Amino acid sequence: MKIASMVCVGVLAVMSADAVAAQTKKAPAAAAKAPAGAVRTVEITGSETMKYDVTTITAKPGEKIRVVLKAVGSMPKIAMGHNFVLLKLGVSPLEVSNAAFNARATDFVPAEMKDKIIAATKLAGGGETVEVTFTAPTKLGSYDYLCTFPGHFSQGMKGTLTVK
Ligand SMILES: [Cu+2]
């Protein structure tokens, strides 16, 4: 019998204390399944052609999501920065993008739009990575996300998170 292959509690119950200790060392129970309340990571790359490589994300209502955004390239963020800004249901990404032009001081996340935004990363320059963790809305629907660096939304740097 291979000890490492035993993951069933019922099997463990009949094992000797020594065998249980050995099994625990070789294969921690935590590795068997994700703990409750786990955070799912979604990795996105932002390119110098002003695109995300992930334009659709699907989430369960109330799921915890960690978006990790990597900006590829070598340009400093003052010239080519990217962020990830997720909007509430029905909010116009164009409206937020337009307001962002005047929000350099806050990484192009306009303060007056805070109540329209679910989550936003900081701005990442070339080679940098930023992230944000949030809870997906419980209301089903398609939520827009965009990069609010000036001009990037109009170049197509956007996507949708669908809660279903
Ligand atoms: Cu961008």
Image (cartoon, rainbow, N blue to C red):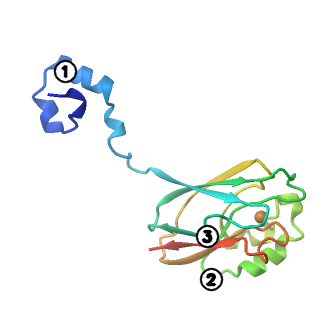
Query: Which amino acid type corresponds to the residue marked 2 in the rendered image?
Result: Gly
Looking at the rendered structure, the secondary structure element under dot 3 is: loop
User: In this figure, which residue is indicated by the disc labeled 2?
Assistant: 90
- Numbered-mark total: 3
Q: Nearest the camera: 94 or 69?
A: 69
Residue drawn at 45 percent across, 68 percent down: 61
- Would you identify the image quadrant in which residue 122 lies? bottom right
> Rounded to the nearest whole Å, what is the CA distance between mark 3 and mark 2?
18 Å
Q: Residues within 10 Å of mark 2 (few under 14, many from 20)?
A: few
Say whether residue 33 is left or right of residue 12.
right
The answer to whether 80 appears left or right of 34 in the picture is: right
Answer yes or no: disc 2 within 8 Å of ligand 1.
no
The residue where tag 1 is placed is 19
Q: Do the residues under discs 1 and 2 have CB atoms within 8 angstroms? A: no
Question: Residue visible at 25% across and 21% down?
Answer: 21
x, y percent for residue 23: 25, 25
The residue at the point 72 percent across, 67 percent down is 51
Residue that mark 3 sits on:
55
Query: At label 1, which amino acid type do we have?
Result: Ala
